[in-house]
Image (cartoon, rainbow, N blue to C red):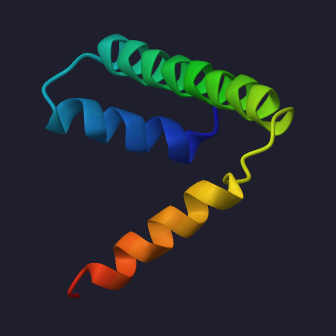
Amino acid sequence: MPDELFLRADATARRLKLSRSALYAKAVSAYLEQQDNAEITRRLNEVYSRTSSKLDPQLARMQAKLFKKEAW
């Protein structure tokens, strides 16, 4: 680990009143959670890329009529 990163982690652990091990455990946990979320997003994007998200033309016309009646 680079010295600068170690010193920043050490200072942060002291400020948060955590041991360095607890800080590292929290950091690894947050990183792994982020990776899991990224994988879920990747999979959802893959699924949704296979289907059309185009709005049915009749439904689009109906929505447009409703918006004309709304006062913005």
Q: Is residue 47 left or right of residue 19?
A: right
Q: Quadrant of residue 25?
A: top left
Q: Residue at x 64, y 31 (%)?
A: 41
Q: Residue at x 37, y 84 (%)?
A: 68
Q: Nearer the viewer, residue 60 or 40?
A: 60
Q: Measured from the top left, where is residue 72 in percent x and y?
A: 23, 88
Considering the image in quadrants, where does the N terminus appear?
A: top right
Q: Residue at x 68, y 52 (%)?
A: 56
Q: Is residue 38 left or right of residue 50?
A: left
Tag count in the figure?
A: 0
Q: Measured from the top left, where is residue 36 in percent x and y?
A: 59, 18
Q: Is residue 39 left or right of residue 19?
A: right
Q: Measured from the top left, where is residue 26 in percent x and y?
A: 36, 18
Q: Quadrant of residue 49?
A: top right
- The correct choice, above or below, for 43 with respect to 12 in the image is above
Q: Measured from the top left, where is residue 54 in percent x and y?
A: 74, 53
Q: Nearer the viewer, residue 49 or 34?
A: 49
> Residue pushed farthest right?
50
Q: Nearer the viewer, residue 56 or 16?
A: 56
Q: Residue at x 81, y 35 (%)?
A: 51
Q: Nearer the viewer, residue 66 or 4?
A: 66
- The correct choice, above or below, for 52 with respect to 20 in the image is below
- The correct choice, above or below, for 50 with respect to 36 in the image is below
- The correct choice, above or below, for 54 with respect to 37 in the image is below
